[in-house]
Image: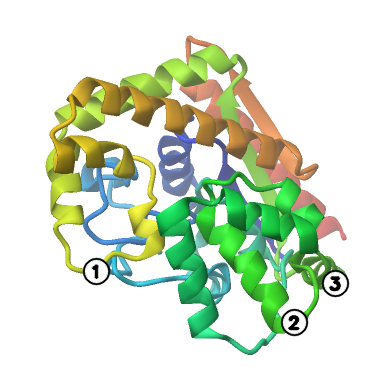
């Protein structure tokens, strides 16, 4: 089974630059594994790679949805796998890069999505409750029927809480049980996962704060205003970090500075959750760096890790 090169890590860690550099050296193409970068018109707030940053490297799974459309990890797995197979068929190296661990696991086949009866009215009721009252009540309800899944989720993660409740409603089984059964099946690919992040948390947080400031200067407020002016938004787009924090400023005339500080705080919390997720994955090969980033060394280490994965594959 051919190894699939994956670049993961928290937001603002340098995944984009590393994946592009590796693609240039390995004759590769990039498949995004970011649940927010799927949406058109959500560019600055999701830190979507610009055309200049892509350096001519083809990128897939970007800008495939309108912000009013819903999307699932199961759909991502199906669509992203088609991209990976197409890249392989053309003799190129697919590089999956992003910070949405659930999407990566779905693509690799670590999670299997069983066919189940959908109940649109039930989902709509859950989404309405989350919108009106927040996710604390929904998370408490999930804790009663699926404590293992609930323990991994934050009350603000409405999408995954709703997904877990919806799965239990449809199957009568906890989503954790369904996923565990899926993990017994063979993987779609043999992952070669490289994680990149600053060794010290304060360095990561400083990078995040700097990025948010750059986003504000780059037009994030105007992008958020255009987003919320749309007649229909999916619950995922409405809850996206980088946009929801600006709503009090855009709709109620609140001061901008506290909204920006909240955006930084929520992004730091999200990065912490990403780190926790990926550090719990024993298959991730970590590359840690300090405040003085030596990108050449990071790239060299990444090449060596992937080379070892390929050698291991050919020797088995």
Q: Measuring 80% from the left and 54% from the top, which residue is drawn there?
A: 148
Q: Relative to 284, is 13 on the left or the right?
A: left
Q: Can residue 79 be seen from the camera position used here?
A: no
Q: Are marks 1 and 3 in contact (CB under 8 Å)?
A: no
Q: Is residue 142 visible?
A: yes
Query: Quarter holding the N terminus?
Result: bottom right
Dot 3 or dot 2: first in sequence order is: 2
Q: How is the image coloured?
A: rainbow
Observer-nearest of 297 and 91: 297
Q: Residues within 10 Å of mark 3 (few under 14, many from 20)?
A: some
In front: label 3 or label 2: 2
Write the residue at 62% across / 22% down: 288
Label 2 SS: helix
Helix, strand or loop for disc 3: helix
Between 235 and 94, which is closer to the camera in this rendering?
235
Task: Answer few, some or many: residues within 10 Å of disc 2's Cα (few below 14, many 20 plus, some between 14 and 19).
Answer: some
Residue furthest out toward the top: 292
Q: Nearer the viewer, residue 90 or 294?
A: 294
Q: Which mark is residue 171?
A: 2
Q: CA distance from mark 3 to mark 2?
A: 13 Å
Q: What percent of the width, then of the height, locates residue 158?
A: 52, 56
Q: Residue at x 26, y 52 (%)?
A: 42
Secondary structure type for disc 1: loop
Where is residue 53 shown, x and y percent of the image?
Answer: 29, 41
**Residue carrying label 1:** 232
Instruction: Determine crowd level at label 1: few under 14, some 14-19, many 20+ residues with C-alpha closer than 10 A.
Output: some
Could you tell me which quadrant the C terminus lies in?
A: bottom right
Q: Earlier in the sequence, mark 2 or mark 1?
A: 2
Residue nearer the viewer, 223 or 150: 150
The residue identified by callout 3 is: 181
């Amino acid at each position: 089974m051919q190894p699939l090169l994956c670049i993961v890590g928290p937001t603002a860690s340098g995944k984009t630059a590393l994946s592009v550099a590796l693609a240039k050296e390995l004759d590769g193409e990039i498949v995004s594994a970011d649940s927010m970068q799927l949406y058109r018109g959500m560019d600055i707030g999701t830190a979507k790679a610009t055309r200049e940053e892509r350096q001519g490297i083809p990128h897939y799974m970007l800008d495939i949805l309108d912000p009013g459309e819903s999307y699932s990890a199961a759909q991502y797995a199906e669509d992203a796998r088609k991209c990976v197979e197409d890249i392989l068929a053309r003799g190129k190296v697919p590089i999956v890069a992003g910070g949405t661990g659930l999407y990566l696991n779905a693509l690799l086949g670590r999670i299997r999505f069983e066919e189940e009866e959908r109940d649109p009215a039930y989902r709509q009721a859950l989404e309405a409750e989350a919108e009106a009252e927040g996710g604390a009540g929904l998370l408490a309800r999930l804790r009663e029927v699926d404590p293992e899944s609930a323990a991994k989720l934050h009350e603000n993660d409405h999408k995954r809480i709703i997904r877990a409740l919806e799965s239990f409603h449809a199957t009568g089984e906890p989503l954790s049980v369904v996923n565990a059964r899926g993990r017994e099946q063979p993987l779609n690919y043999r992952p070669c996962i490289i994680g990149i992040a600053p060794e010290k948390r304060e360095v990561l947080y400083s990078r995040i704060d700097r990025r948010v400031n750059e986003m504000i200067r780059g037009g994030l407020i105007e992008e958020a205003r255009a987003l919320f002016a749309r007649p229909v938004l999916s619950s995922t787009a409405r809850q996206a970090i980088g946009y929801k924090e600006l709503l009090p400023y855009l709709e109620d005339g609140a001061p901008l500075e506290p909204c920006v500080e909240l955006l930084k705080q929520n992004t730091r919390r999200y990065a912490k959750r990403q780190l926790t997720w990926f550090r719990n994955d024993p298959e991730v090969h970590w590359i840690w760096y300090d405040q003085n980033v030596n990108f050449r060394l990071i790239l060299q280490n990444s090449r060596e890790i992937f080379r070892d994965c390929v050698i291991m594959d050919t020797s088995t």
